[in-house]
Structures are given as structure tokens and as C-alpha cells.
Amino acid sequence: MSNDIKPEIGHKLIRYGILLFLLGLITGFAIPLMENSRMGLSSHLEGVQNGMLLMLFGIIWTRLNLPKQALRAGYFLALFGTYINWLTTFLAGMWGAGGELMPIAGVGFMGTTWQEILIKFGLFSLSIAMVLVCGIILFGLRGEAYRLE
């Protein structure tokens, strides 16, 4: 099976990583406008760090020994997990919510019931997505070491 989609997916991961990095930087400007500025700082850091993570994934993507379906699944899980991580903390900062699951950044802050449910769903689903994508990547790095030709 040809894996000629690996360079294309790798390029997309790098591009979306740069975009998320930029969103993280812009989020830094919005921190003073947020209901919970500490959560806003968390969102800023999540955007910047997850943007770099996507870029790193993009760089190593061509080294993965996986079928196309696994490459695509890993790609979508990586995008979902990293962007939802930024978005969930951003919304929690804007709403002044998230104290239940993020007690350090959200100490003393509690949103409405629907806001807290949305944040919980985001945090749990992104956690599962990131564990899965890391497992997929680790499995894809099995076998012989990558060689430059």
C-alpha cells in the first residue's frame, strides 16, 4: 500500500500548527478582556504549545509506518485534540468557567450548567483524542529506524 499521503498530511499538520500557534499568540492579547485571566493565560499557552506539537507531528509524519486509514485517523485526532484544548480553555476564560475540572486556573470560577458541561465534554474528549494519537504515532514509529537516503 502506497503511503504517498504522508507528506501531504505532514504539511497540513505543520500549517495548522502555525495557525494554532498564531491563535495562541492572539489569545495572549485577549487575556485582559477575559472574565478569568488566569484561564486566559492557560488558553494562550495551550495554543502556543499545541501549535508546536502539531508542527512536530508534521515533521515526523513521513517516518510513520502505518496504513492510510491510521494516518488519516491520527491526523484528525491530532487536530481535534489540539484545537479543542485551546478552544475549551479559551471559552472557560471568557465565561469565567471551568473551576470544577481545572481547579488551579479556574479556582473560584464556575460557569452555568451548560457551560460546565461543554467544558467537561471538551476536556474529556480531547484527552482521549490525544492519548489515541500518541498511541498511533508510537505504533507507527515501530520497526526499523528512519534512514536518510
Image (cartoon, helix red, strand yellow):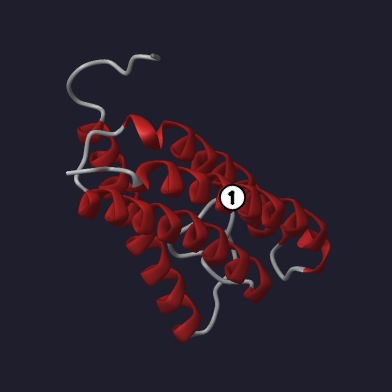
Residue 80 point in image, percent of width and height: 42, 61
What residue is disc 1 on?
15
Q: Nearer the viewer, residue 121 or 22?
A: 22
Q: Nearer the viewer, residue 44 or 143?
A: 143
Q: Nearer the viewer, residue 24 or 107?
A: 24
Q: Is residue 97 visible?
A: yes
67 left or right of 92? left
Please tell me whether residue 120 is drawn above or below residue 25 in the rendered image.
Answer: below
Please tell me whether residue 37 is drawn above or below residue 66 in the rendered image.
Answer: below
Q: Quadrant of the N terminus?
A: top left
Q: What residue is drawn where x is 27% and y is 43%? A: 3
Q: What residue is drawn where x is 77% and y is 60%? A: 31
Q: Quadrant of the C terminus?
A: top left
Q: Nearer the viewer, residue 138 or 12?
A: 12
Q: Is residue 46 visible?
A: no
Q: Quadrant of residue 72?
A: bottom left
Q: What residue is drawn where x is 51% and y is 60%? A: 83
Amino acid beneath label 1 = Arg
